[in-house]
Image (tube, rainbow, N blue to C red):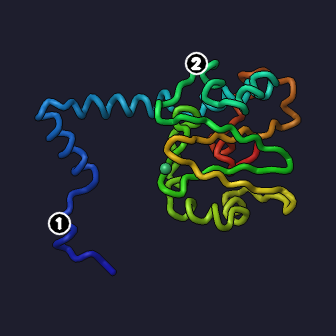
Amino acid sequence: MSTPDHVIQRTASVEQRVDAIQAALDERGMKATEAVEELQHLAEEQWIPQNGARVVARAWVDPAFKARLLANGRDAVAELGLSMPKHHRHLVVLENTSAVQNVICCTLCSCTAFTIIGLPPDWYKDLEYRSRVVRESRTVLREMGLDLAPEVEIKVWDTTADTRYMVLPEQPPETIGWSEEKLASIVSRDAMIGVARL
Ligand SMILES: [Fe+2]
C-alpha cells in the first residue's frame, strides 16, 4: 500500500525531527547539541570493538588473565583500563571451542556490552535476527556465512539490562606465537557476538 501524498507532506524526516527537538532543548538551555556531540565522540572513538579485541588477545596469550576474565569479566577488563556503565553489572565472557559456538543477542531490543565490543550493528537490532537466532540459530548463522558442522553445539545467550555478554573466540592455530597487538588486529566484532569464527 502506498502512502497518500498528504501524509508524506505533513511528516518531517527523522533528521528534521531530531534537529527540531535538539533546537527546542538548546533554546531552553539544556545543551542537547553538546550532549549529542559528546555521545557521537564516545560512540565513534571509545565504544569500539578494538577494546574487546585487546581483551581477547590478552586472554589468548595469558592463561591467568583468561581465567580471571571467565570468572569475572567486569573486573578483568578493568585491568586493561576498560570500564562499563554502572548498570552493566555483569560481563559474562563465553568461551568458544571447536565443540561449542556461543552466540549473543538481545531478544527485547539491542543491548550489548557496548563499551567493550562496540555498539550493536543494525542487523543485531532487527526483529529478524532477535527472533530467529533463538528459534533457528544454525540456519541464521549459515545465512550469515557461518556454516557449522552438525556436531558443534550452539548456545544462544539473551542479554538483559544488567548482564552483558561477550564471546571469547577460539584462537586460530596458525596465530599461536603472534604478538598481542597482531592478535588483536584479527578479532572482529562479529566474532565477539558469536556470528563468525576467526
Ligand atoms: Fe536490549
Tell me whether the residue at label 2 lies in contact with that at label 1, contact meaning CB atoms closer than 8 angstroms: no
Quarter-wise, where is residue 136 in the image? bottom right
In this view of the protein, which residue sits in the foreground, 20 or 165?
Answer: 165
Q: Is mark 2 within 8 Å of ligand 1?
A: no
Mark identifier at residue 177: none
Q: Which residue is mark 1?
A: 9
Q: Position of residue 169 (x, y in %)?
A: 75, 40
Secondary structure beneath label 2: loop
Badge 2 crowding class, 10 Å Cα cut-off, few under 14, some 14 to 19, many 20 or more, is few
Amino acid beneath label 2: Gly
Up/down of 42 relative to 153, above or below: above
Position in image of residue 144 (x %, y %): 67, 58
CA–CA distance between discs 2 and 1? 50 Å
Please give the name of the residue rendered at 57% of the width and 60% of the height, measured from the top-left corner: 129
Residue 111 on image: x %, y %: 51, 46
Locate the C terminus and report the quarter of the image it occupies.
Answer: top right
Image coordinates for residue 24, horizontal then vertical, percent: 14, 41
Q: Residue at x 22, y 44 (%)?
A: 19
Q: In the rendered image, which quarter is residue 82 located in?
A: top right
Inspect the image, locate mark 1, and give the three-letter code of the amino acid beneath it. Answer: Gln
Up/down of 32 relative to 126, above or below: above
- Chain-order first, disc 2 or disc 1: 1
**For numbered disc 1, what is the local secondary structure?**
helix
Q: Residue at x 60, y 29 (%)?
A: 74
Q: Is mark 1 within 8 Å of ligand 1?
A: no
- Location of residue 11 by image quarter: bottom left
Q: Which mark is residue 81?
A: 2
